[in-house]
């Protein structure tokens, strides 16, 4: 197990290194000169040159690359041309908001996606299956920005089921002292249950929406994997042995479909960290998605690179966890051959 | 038995979330309980340094945190808002004198001035601020130095005594008052600045993240990316005239969400809504729309260095084919006025015969004749626009259609905003739609920014030595009558050359709950929030 883990860690490190190189050169393809944009409308050639020098943009590309790699090795993701802050500091400011939202959305996505997929497979060809397929077809065809706006209009402003989408806390509420950056947890640490409830309430609608959108792919994959498992020869044998509906569904179906489901859960988790830009914009959620959106519009190269690195590392770590979960979920996997 | 427990468990978890939030439901009503506090839906605050911030929301926050020597005089107008005049009233000064030759300005500060933290505000703070704004640490030093006629701030701005500041100008500067009233000249604490001088000696890092308020409000909190909370500064020299006790400025990036929140009474003021939402708001009970004529000028640029726009007749043909009235009606839904030349009708010295006159008349036949004179047939051109600006995008579609009637085929090129900014400022685009709003209502400021040869914001590539001379002479000229004459001549050149074709001036729209009043229209388009009150 240890050797397997070391091999996976090594391959993860190589993946991250390749990604870091690619993202450096890819971000140079972004249109626009960050120094011109930062200098603004009263720019002089001298001011633009000074900004370029301050951010190392006047150096030859290979020198910029070495500075970038040297910085990465020291955990330095560069400096935002727009905010003037270290990118790592900005990301640390905004990342907890994204993670808190993503975690709750992930729970929602797994609950909905796996449940819908399992029920649809168990009742394949019957009305629950038709409903599930309708859910995935309709949900998958709706643009997320439209769905988010409609959810706000109907669920917040028409029915009053959720609080106004004005950020992580209701208006007039002060944030608890920062420990984790997760407001629900920080509020609990501060002993303020009401504040934690308020923070959770603010989280609920964007998390439900994101979770529901993410659950669609999970539901489809779960259904397909379950149907495959339920029609396999071992399941037919179990049916012949009259092992009972529950055993067939969970032991023969779900357990054999689990590696596939875990893989798609990994994709969903990665997508939730990287793909919140629209929901964060519409719900005034101060996460890294919104930070990236502004950075791209300003051609803020270090921020774009930093974001991709952070998200990429998250993906790699999630994949690592997924691989380990394979081993746990499926004893047939031979560690000596895996990886 | 246990099998049946699974589905209810999932359902319970989901309904629990909804139930939890249901008891926290939206306010669903008016802004009751906020008689002296206001919530404003706006954009992002990118910093607090008056000479570094870039976003309009940050500039608005700064304009309300810091006091100026003088302020633009505001008067109520029939449309229900406060309009900035071309007069200036005392800010933190009790007396302001100009020497007979117009070159020496003497400011006497009011007695007992302090910053919000109680530390005294003296002439040293004024000198520190002015020198800093005119220094390399400032992103606005270039135009400020030129228009205030201060070539050496260290020598020309002096503290005579703790309550007196003397500014010696190189020559009389007609725009100096307008500059002194800008947020970039809001008075900072020299003590805090000196104590936190930082790498560039100008305390940039300190002032980007911290405020030393001297104005109507003080900073209670700034949750980066989320909100800024301001509270009334009881130590402000005119604190008695400040109505709001508290302001919350929310970063609501999505305009639809700002509008919905306003409709629901969650916020009191929504800034920067599109013409579509402003129009919708105008028919909503409980909301008031202030659509205020501004100098935000949309224009068509034709680069005379890029074929076929190197031919003046082609430029004039395009100018004759543009559907000006249609753009105002269909793109900005009537929330605009005609643009006559580079100097809008509401800016001093504009040569517009009336506020309804357009620079060129739409006449497709005339456009065809001009093209024939130019010897051009089957013309195909690229029209570049920033994809981030829906008004430019919509305008381009209508221009494309109108030019087709004149025999010009237009291909619309949508560029990423950063790409558009960079390439247009490098004068690489031959044909484009852009916009501009001057902070200072001075015709020479406007013309210098937009058309002076090789200015950073001259996107058209326009270069005309006679025009440049007129503008530079106008900047240096102290006599108003002579300035009027220079400005008129320069405007005529621009109209004749047709490199820069004004499309319309878009109104500044602010939508509020109906019980809110005190919306302002200042020259710099930054709302002054001390005037906000409830009916």
Image (cartoon, grey):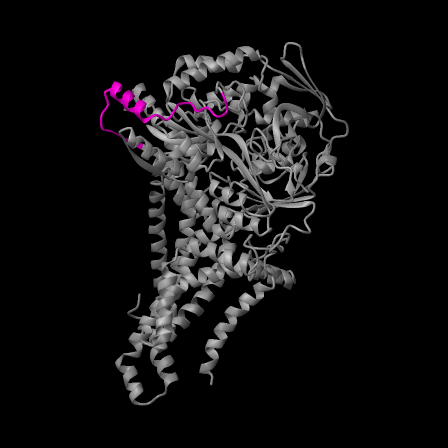
Task: Please identify the quarter of the rendering in which residue A9 is found.
Answer: bottom left
How many discs mark residues in the rendered view?
Answer: 0
Q: Is residue A267 visible?
A: no
Q: Tell me if residue B422 is in the magenta stretch.
A: no
Q: Residue at x 30, y 19 (%)?
A: B313
Foreground: A306 or A249? A249
A131, above or below A26, in the image: below
Residue shown at 46%/34% (left/top)?
A38
For image coordinates 40% across by 36% down, the residue present is B392
> For the point 74% across and 36% down, which residue is it?
B240
Depth check, front residue: A202 or B89: B89
The image position of residue B43, as x and y in percent, is 53, 43
> Residue B218 appears at what percent x and percent y?
67, 40
Q: Is residue A215 visible?
A: yes
The residue most toward the bottom is: A241
Q: Which residues are magenta?
A: B354-382
Quarter of the image where the C terminus of chain A is located = bottom left
Residue B366 in which image quadrant: top left
Is B360 within the magenta?
Answer: yes
Q: Position of residue A301 (x, y in %)?
A: 41, 41
Hey, which residue is sitting farthest right in the picture?
Answer: B112
Q: Quadrant of the N terminus of chain A?
A: bottom left
Left or right, residue B232 beside residue B140? right
For this view, does B45 lie left or right of residue A6?
Answer: right
Query: Residue B523 location in percent, x, y?
Result: 57, 28
């Amino acid at each position: 197990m240890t050797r397997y883990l070391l091999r996976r860690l090594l391959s993860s490190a190589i993946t991250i290194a390749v990604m870091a190189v690619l993202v450096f050169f890819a971000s140079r393809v972004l249109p626009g000169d960050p120094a011109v944009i930062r200098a603004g409308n009263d720019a002089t050639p001298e001011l633009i040159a000074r900004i370029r020098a301050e951010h190392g943009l006047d150096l030859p590309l290979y020198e910029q690359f070495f500075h970038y790699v040297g910085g990465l090795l020291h955990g330095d993701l560069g400096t935002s041309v727009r905010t003037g802050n270290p990118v790592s500091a900005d990301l640390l400011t905004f990342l907890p908001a994204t993670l808190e939202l993503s975690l709750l959305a992930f729970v929602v996505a797994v609950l909905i996606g796996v449940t819908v997929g399992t029920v649809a497979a168990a009742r394949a060809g019957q009305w629950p299956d038709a409903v599930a397929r309708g859910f995935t077809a309709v949900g998958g065809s709706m643009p997320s920005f439209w769905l988010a706006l409609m959810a706000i209009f109907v669920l917040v402003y028409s029915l009053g089921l959720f609080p106004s989408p004005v950020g992580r806390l209701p208006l007039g509420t002060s944030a608890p002292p920062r420990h984790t950056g997760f407001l629900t947890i920080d509020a609990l640490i501060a002993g303020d249950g009401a504040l934690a409830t308020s923070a959770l309430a603010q989280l609920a609608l964007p998390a439900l929406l994101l979770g529901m959108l993410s659950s669609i792919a999970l539901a489809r994959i779960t259904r397909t994997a379950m149907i495959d498992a339920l029609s396999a020869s071992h399941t037919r044998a179990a049916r012949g042995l009259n092992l009972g509906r529950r055993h067939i569904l969970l032991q023969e179906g779900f357990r054999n479909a689990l590696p596939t489901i875990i893989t798609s859960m990994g994709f969903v988790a990665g997508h939730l960290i990287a793909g919140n830009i629209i929901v964060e914009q519409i719900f005034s959620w101060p996460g890294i998605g919104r930070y990236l959106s502004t950075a791209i519009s300003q051609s803020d190269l270090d921020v774009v690179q930093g974001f991709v690195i952070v998200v990429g590392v998250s993906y790699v770590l999630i994949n690592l966890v997924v691989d380990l979960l394979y081993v746990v979920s499926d004893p047939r996997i031979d560690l000596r051959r895996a990886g | 038995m246990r099998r049946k427990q699974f589905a209810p468990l999932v359902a319970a978890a989901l309904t629990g979330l909804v139930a939890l939030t249901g008891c926290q439901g939206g306010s669903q009503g008016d802004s009751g309980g906020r008689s002296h506090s206001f919530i404003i839906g706006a954009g992002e605050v990118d910093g607090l340094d008056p000479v570094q911030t870039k976003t309009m929301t940050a500039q608005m926050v700064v304009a309300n945190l810091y006091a100026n020597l003088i302020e633009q005089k505001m008067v109520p107008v029939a449309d229900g808002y406060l309009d900035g005049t071309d007069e200036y009233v005392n800010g933190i000064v009790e007396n302001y004198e100009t020497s007979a030759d117009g070159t020496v300005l003497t400011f006497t500060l009011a007695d007992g001035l302090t910053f919000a933290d109680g530390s005294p505000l003296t002439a040293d703070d004024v000198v520190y601020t002015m020198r800093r704004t005119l220094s390399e640490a400032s992103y606005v030093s270039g135009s400020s130095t030129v228009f205030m006629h201060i070539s050496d701030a260290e020598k020309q701005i002096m503290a005579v005594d703790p309550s007196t500041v003397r500014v010696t100008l190189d020559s009389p500067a007609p725009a100096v008052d307008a500059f002194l009233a800008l947020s970039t000249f809001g008075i900072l604490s020299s003590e805090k600045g000196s104590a936190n001088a930082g790498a560039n000696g100008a305390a940039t890092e300190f002032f980007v993240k911290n405020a030393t308020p001297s104005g109507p409000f003080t900073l209670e909190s700034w949750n980066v990316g989320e909100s800024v909370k301001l509270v009334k500064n009881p130590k402000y020299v005119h604190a008695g005239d400040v109505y709001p006790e508290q302001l919350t400025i929310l970063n609501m990036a999505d305009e639809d969400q700002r509008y919905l929140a306003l409709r629901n009474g969650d916020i009191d003021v929504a800034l920067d809504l599109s013409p579509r939402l402003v129009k919708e708001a105008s028919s909503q009970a409980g909301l008031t729309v202030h659509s205020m004529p501004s100098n935000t000028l949309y224009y068509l640029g034709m680069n005379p260095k890029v074929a076929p726009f190197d031919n003046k007749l082609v430029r004039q043909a395009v100018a004759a084919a543009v559907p000006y009235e249609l753009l105002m009606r269909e793109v900005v839904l009537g929330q605009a006025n005609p643009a006559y030349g580079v100097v809008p009708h509401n800016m001093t010295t504009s040569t517009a015969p009336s506020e309804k006159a357009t620079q060129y008349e739409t006449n497709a036949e005339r456009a065809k004749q001009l093209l024939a004179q130019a010897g051009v047939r089957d013309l195909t051109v690229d029209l570049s626009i920033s994809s981030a600006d829906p008004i430019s995008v919509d305008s381009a579609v209508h221009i494309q259609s109108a030019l087709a009637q004149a025999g010009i085929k237009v291909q619309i090129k949508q560029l990423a905003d950063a790409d558009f900014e960079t390439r247009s400022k490098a004068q690489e685009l031959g044909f484009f739609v852009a916009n501009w709003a001057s902070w200072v209502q001075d015709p020479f400021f406007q013309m210098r920014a937009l058309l002076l040869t090789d200015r950073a914001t001259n996107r058209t590539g326009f270069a005309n030595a006679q025009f440049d001379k007129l503008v530079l002479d106008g900047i240096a000229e102290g006599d108003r009558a002579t300035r009027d004459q220079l400005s008129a001549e320069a405007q005529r050149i621009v109209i004749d050359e047709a490199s820069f074709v004004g499309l319309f001036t878009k109104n500044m729209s602010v939508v509020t709950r109906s019980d809110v009043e005190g919306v302002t229209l200042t020259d710099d388009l930054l709302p002054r929030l001390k005037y906000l009150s409830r009916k």
